[in-house]
Image: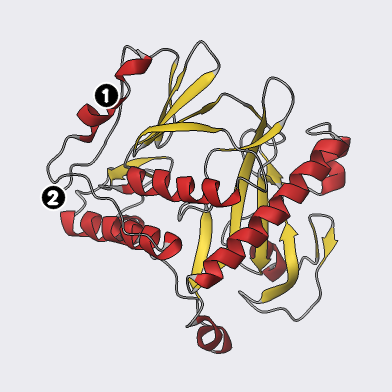
Amino acid sequence: MSAYLPLHEAVIPELPNYYRGKVRENYDLPDGRRILISTDRLSAFDRAIAAIPLKGRVLTQTARWWFEQTADICPNHVLEYPDPNVVVGKRLDILPVEMVVRGYLGGTTGTSILTMYKQGRREMYGMTFPDGLRDNEVLPQPVITPTSKAFDGGHDEPLSPAQIVESGLVSREQWDRLSAYTLALFARGQKLASERGLILADTKYEFGTDAAGNILLADEIHTPDSSRYWFAESYPERFAAGGKPESFDKDFVRNWVVARCDPYTQDLPEIPQELIDETSAVYVRAFETITGQAFDYPPEGEDPQQRIRANLARYF
């Protein structure tokens, strides 16, 4: 059994306007602030399949480090951190475009440039890609491959900048600001990652507007869940051999489940604690490698929900 108790949920009835996300609990305060609590839920196959101790703490603290490293580039939603799992931010109207940026020909989803490239497509996202590129090859310059869920009932839809503006998802002025922020944030991310022996291969950003119409960075930034990191030292050899780049492998639980059932239609078998503990250790390793800081562990056996509740009492 893990020495650290997982945070399955953080339901606090005294806080108003509760919304449960896949991994976060959200509360909207009357004064325009939003409380976001990162739980340890691991979401896959359209459901929560496990709780990974320390995961929410790692993601909150990793994003905190990156928000602080990039505040000079782009304003963000953060107001304060009353708990290691919690950020209090400005409540924003989230823009309906997810800004995905890629430095390499990679990805696994249906909207990734690698998937579409291997299908023979060369015109993607308003850009033309040359023939002869290999899996996970560095691109001449980072490219923005935006998606939106607005067109297809909740499924990510690849869009060109012209389509985004013409459809009215965002204005031309907003698009220009979003793309400039995205490329600058990614450049900072790649630079700092390289200093830690990492390649930031791709990531995604969400932006929103405040009451005055200003664009702010929302959600999270450069976490192991929103970004693809590779280890720089082994990349050249693996790329030359046509192998998969070495990364933070957090998929122990997902892979174990897929090997034993159809997770979309069948009940899940009981997941071994050993796998959950391995995954927890990978998240902590990711934090320490990315930030160069020692992870701040909670006391062993501490109930994270009780701690969070106490730290948020002033918002009741």
Labelled disc at residue 236: none
Residue 242 in sight here:
no
Please name whichever residue, 35 or 135, is drawn nearer the observer in this view of the structure.
Answer: 35
Q: Amino acid at mark 2?
A: Ala
Front tag of 2 and 1:
1
The residue where tag 1 is placed is 309
Tell me the residue that label 2 is attached to.
3
Vertical side of 289 occupied by 69: above or below = above
Which SS class for mark 2?
Answer: loop
Q: From the viewer's side, name the closer residue of 153 and 216.
A: 216
Q: Residues within 10 Å of mark 2 (few under 14, many from 20)?
A: few
Q: Is residue 308 left or right of residue 220?
A: left
- Going from N to C along the chain, the mark reached first, 2 or 1, is 2
Looking at the image, the residue that sits furthest to the front is 72
| Residue at 44% across, 62% down | 290
Q: Which residue is found at the position 40% from the left and 47% from the top? A: 61
On screen, residue 210 above or below 240: above
Q: Amino acid at mark 1?
A: Arg
Would residue 12 appear left or right of 1 to someone viewing this image?
Answer: right
